[in-house]
Image (spheres, rainbow, N blue to C red):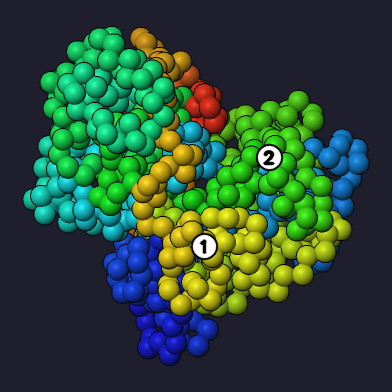
Amino acid sequence: VIEKGTPDKSVVTTCAYCGVGCTFRAEMRGEDLVRMVPWKEGKANHGHSCVKGRFAWGYAQHRDRILNPMVRSSVDEPWREVSWDEAIAHVASEFRRIQSSYGTRAIGGITSSRCTNEETFLVQKLIRQGFGNNNVDTCARVCHSPTGYGLKTTFGTSAGTQDFDSVEQADVVLVIGANPTDGHPVFGSRLKKRLREGAKLIVVDPRRIDLVRSPHIEAAHHLPLRPGTNVALLTAMAHVIVTEGLVDETYVRERCDGEAYAEWAAFASDPARSPEAIEDLTGIPAADVRAAARLYATGGNGAIYYGLGVTEHSQGSSTVMAIANLAMATGNVGKPGAGVNPLRGQNNVQGSCDMGSFPHELPGYRHVSDSATRALFEADWGTVLDAEPGLRIPNMLDAATDGTFKGIFIQGEDILQSDPNTKHVAAGLAAMECVVVQDLFLNETANYAHVFLPGSTFLEKDGTFTNAERRIQRVRKVMEPKNGYADWEVVQLVANAMGLDWTYTHPSQVMDEIARLTPTFAGVNYDVLDERGSVQWPMNAAAPEGTPTMHIDHFVRGKGLFVVTDYVPTDERTGPRFPLLLTTGRILSQYNVGAQTRRTPNEAWHAEDRLEIHPHDAENRGVRDGDWVSLRSRAGETTLRALITDRVAPGVVYTTFHHPDTQANVITTDFSDWATNCPEYKVTAVQVAPSNGP
Ligand code: SF4
């Protein structure tokens, strides 16, 4: 029973699952949360929600939560519960010891995209001001870092160009590498409504996602391309648009860099990049590519929505830029109903990127080498900042195994489960002298930790999240932290134990500091958020009402930049031993590795991950529906049950990754995006064989 009792008060707050950012009334009776009711005034959800936000909050009171700090001198020893004072003093003395023995840059940290903007800002401040380096990274490294690189390069800033409301003015919707009805359900429902009203749909996905065919919806085109060939397909669409005279010449002339456009147009029009030339590579008939390109270019307002099927590739950044090229060539950026819109996974992954969680960028996407920006922060913080970019997560792990990186503070991120090549992550963590993990539960990464600091849930803190449409919304404290402190308070305790002098008494003061130091947030404060419900950045003197649609008169970088995106095959190849390609995705009721949803009633709705396999591939291997199969790659092996379906094409298999037993990252490869190191989770060559089970 989830809903019980009669509430006597309610608090409006924001869902802590996905990047849609639905708002809810948390209804309380006394100190007990009774139910979560979707908030009608919520601008991201307009009173709607999915099962996760509505029902999957029981983890906040789950018995598995760790409520007391714990330390141990070696990972072979049992944990010892200690007071907060002892734990914080231990963390500070260990980090100081490491720095005096191995140098300032021997420690770093990872921010959490599940935590608030204010908490993320403070973690990067702790690292930059307290540790004295830029060794800070975030989970976006393994999901949307190519969005950061690609959209910043082409448009000038790393953010979706539209608000969700804009979909109501779209005439043609191109969904690529995303499954909105499962991954971003409330937006998925809005999209379906628009499609039922008559907007045309193009889906680019190796798998037949629900959107392709559902009641009253039939995609105009489904292009089930071979995994790993996004860039070739998008460039072939560009070829059609350029060679058939479908470019919006006026837009390109007025809004884009002419020299870069000319170079790109010459590249795209090369016959080697035509749909016919790449037919065998992608597996998509040339006529289908031509028809889809014509529809996108001529069908009216064209809106592109994409997800991790775009970014988690060795050419993730190139794919994002290929998408941006298509949108600029057709004049589809800077007006409602159009645009380029990354569907962000985690509730605050947009915010964690905005807040300077990257080793090369201060808050607001300003490079650490920019002396004017550094001077602004230095004057405010009274510290000299490091001008050298720091280490990304994989580089921290490499440096640890090399013996030059010795300590890490990981807030709300289970890198052993979520990052590629589990063996490499484990080796890096094992080589460190002080691993500090802050989380709700003893996660897999905590097996390698020396200090465990209990985390607080979104129900136990004040702050803000920023959703996929750049909408900043309040998170409000519904109950006192069961562990004693909100996460932002813990960061402040660590900072002050390391000799800093922070005096924040409420997250609103952190937001005031963010606004003071970040031009795109200059007009944001808690009074405005309370009054308006939410605002979309940039919000400042130039945009006092916030910015639902970006790049209206000009791109943030000035002229939009076309980038030549040559297709480069992944190094992950199929062959006689590994003939199938594995790709992965999510299901509606579960969330990522399931740490939260598996501790709620949602657990019953998706008891295990299954391997989707085409009937021909199953028959060739003697596999029947429901059989156990072994799934083996060059990196490792796991076991799960088969689900025979023609949703996947022959040669392609698919699984979700919500259950720890699946251990999907045991079999993923070391390959990553050329620009950002985002792992290539979406293409793994595998073999499938009958098995007796785990
Ligand atoms: Fe939460 Fe996303 Fe579901 Fe909305 S769609 S309730 S933000 S998980």
| Dot 1: element | loop
Q: Quadrant of residue 462?
A: bottom right
Q: Tell me the tag on residue 608.
A: none
**What is the CA distance from the residue labelled 1 to the residue labelled 2?**
23 Å
Q: Residue furthest left?
A: 216
Q: Residue at x 65, y 46 (%)?
A: 362
The x, y position of residue 500, in whole percent, is 83, 59
Q: Would you say residue 205 is visible in this rendering?
A: no
Which residue carries the number 1 mark?
541
Which residue carries the number 2 mark?
370
Whether label 2 lies within 8 Å of ligand 1 gets the answer: no
For the N terminus, the quadrant is bottom left
The x, y position of residue 53, in whole percent, is 38, 64
Q: Is 48 displayed left or right of 8 in the figure?
A: left
Q: Residue at x 86, y 37 (%)?
A: 103
Ligand 1 quarter of the rendering: bottom left
Hey, what amino acid is under mark 2?
Asp
Give 458 or 666, whichever is nearer the viewer: 458
Q: Is 493 displayed left or right of 419 in the figure?
A: right
Give 7 or 511, whichever is nearer the viewer: 511
Hey, what amino acid is under mark 1?
Ala
Q: Residue at x 54, y 55 (%)?
A: 520
The x, y position of residue 660, in whole percent, is 48, 44
Q: Would you say residue 194 is visible in this rendering?
A: yes
In the displayed structure, 56 sits above or below 102; it is: below
Q: Residue at x 32, y 32 (%)?
A: 252
Other residues around mark 2 within 10 Å, as few (<14) / some (14–19) / many (≥20): few
In the displayed structure, 297 sits above or below 192; it is: above
